Amino acid sequence: MTQRIDHLINGKTVAGRDYFETINPATQGVLAEVASGTEAEVNAAVQAAKDAFPAWAGLPATERAKKVRALGDLIAKHVPEIARTETEDTGQVIAQTGKQLIPRASDNFYYFAEMCTRVDGHTYPTPTHLNYTLFHPVGVCALISPWNVPFMTATWKVAPCLAFGNTAVLKMSELSPLTAARLGDLALEAGIPAGVLNVVHGFGKEAGEPLCAHPDVRAISFTGSTATGNRIVKAAGLKKFSMELGGKSPFVIFDDADLDRALDAAIFMIFSNNGERCTAGSRILVQQSIYADFAAKFAERAKRIVVGDPLDEKTTIGPMISQGHLAKVRSYIELGPKEGATMLCGGLDRPSYAAELPAHVQAGNYVWPTVFADVDNRMKIAQDEIFGPVACLIPFKDEADAIRIANDIAYGLSSYVWTENIGKAHRVAAAVEAGMCFVNSQNVRDLRQPFGGTKASGTGREGGTWSYEVFLEPKNVAVSL
Ligand code: NAD
């Protein structure tokens, strides 16, 4: 019988009035039937979170920290199981879920468990008054996640939210709900009281919208597309929010860069996570003097990438999350040549592609790593977030040209600069319009760094003390002396 996944409300499983199927994108098999939440379940979950809030917020931070750390321990204990579920539910390859994404999720709990015991304030003494700040938890928070790295994203929200004394209603993407359901169970096992973390499954319109609109929800931490983020912001009114949205990040390589390292990092930043990565270096800007050589080497490397069963340790690219998303990625692969780009590898029309796959995944949502050269930054393939393994190689003349092209985009999430010239590295890092810039590096997350974007990539930052912005409310106390 197909497994059923129910909501978790006030520490109890709550059956759905209706269920939807979550599909394994590699095999098209049904993994589970998942409860489809509506306003009624959202209301019950928010009420449970509201009721649980005073006791949870009132615990000494050291006591909350113990339980939050225990949740990290339970995740660490169950890495292989959670990683396998995540891989089956999303198509993200086991080499990444097992070794990076799920282990890092437990670090999120360890980090914020420590941090919640270190929250301090500021003092502003004057001759007449002593001002000081207090940081209070906000209350009930709506945590909404996308499908691409769902467990990592959920824990990145749940850990600071709970550690700082808030309670939560978590809504995962309808395309990848399974590991968050497990997170809810593990939270209870870790001793986190009923109602502190509630999980409501379902679709954006039926479950996400009423959650964001609920008057008792005080803050929204949302990760997802720019279109949905805009919709939520319009409905959020005076709630606090942080919006982690889409990206089309420039990966700029100057002719004085360490080319072997730049090549490795460029390949990783567009093809890891199946290219379904918000911080993907999807516009690869290469200085004209090295462009032809770089493009040839890049395409050679892309051709060798192993596409296959995501549960196989040797696989680098697994299936796209859904048939709908596959159709979107394929449409951009079709569009590239029509816009005038040169396809160096990949594409749709190699008949042997499906045959290269193991038999049990031949029905999967596969697309092959595709590299476009001669891309003009104004083409749609360069401007739109494709969110798949599709690289655009764009030539540039000099530093000013690189900065102009890098910034000629609606998004501003991440950016990457490769040069051995230290002055140039700092100048470009300062000039690029993005929330993050990595110099001579791929994206390496430090939990203290402000993570987030500017322009259409969002507003607000999370990570380290930056997470105070959404999950804590500062209050100034002024005492007359
Ligand atoms: P999406 O916006 O379609 O959905 C995200 C979540 O929002 C899902 O849980 C969905 O059910 C919910 N939702 C949809 N409509 C809603 C509404 N009206 N109100 C409330 N909730 C609603 O995004 P997606 O396709 O799941 O994810 C891919 C996108 O996420 C990409 O654009 C990617 O760049 C972005 N992303 C950003 C980051 C980041 O940190 N900036 C990280 C990962 C993914």
Image (tube, rainbow, N blue to C red):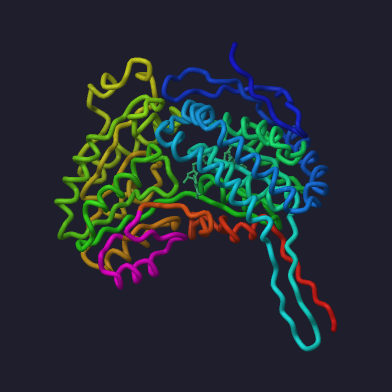
Q: Position of residue 225 (x, y in %)?
A: 51, 45
Name the image quarter holding residue 402: bottom left
The residue shown at (23%, 56%) is 286
Q: Is residue 430 magenta?
A: yes
Name the image quarter holding residue 254: bottom left
Name the image quarter holding residue 27: top left
Q: How many marks?
A: 0
Q: Which of 137 and 321 lies nearest the eye of the viewer?
A: 137
Which quarter holds ligand 1?
top right
The residue shown at (29%, 52%) is 284
- Residue furthest to the right: 480
Q: Which of 382 and 481 lies nearest the eye of the viewer?
A: 481
The residue shown at (40%, 41%) is 387
Q: Which of 7 and 257 lies nearest the eye of the viewer?
A: 257
Q: Is residue 244 left or right of residue 99?
A: right
Q: Quadrant of the C terminus?
A: bottom right
Q: Is residue 124 left or right of residue 318?
A: right
Q: Is residue 435 left or right of residue 237?
A: left
Q: Is residue 421 magenta?
A: yes
Q: Position of residue 33 (x, y in %)?
A: 60, 20
Q: Position of residue 122 (x, y in %)?
A: 69, 72
- Residue furthest to the top: 1
Examine the rendered structure and indicate whether residue 126 appears above or below residue 330.
Answer: below
Q: Which of 408 and 61 lies nearest the eye of the viewer?
A: 61
Q: Position of residue 160 (x, y in %)?
A: 64, 50
The residue shown at (59%, 60%) is 466
Examine the rendered structure and indicate whether residue 221 appears above or below residue 455.
Answer: above
Q: Quadrant of the N terminus?
A: top right
Magenta residues, as a range?
A: 418-441
Examine the rendered structure and indicate whether residue 250 appears above or below residue 204.
Answer: below
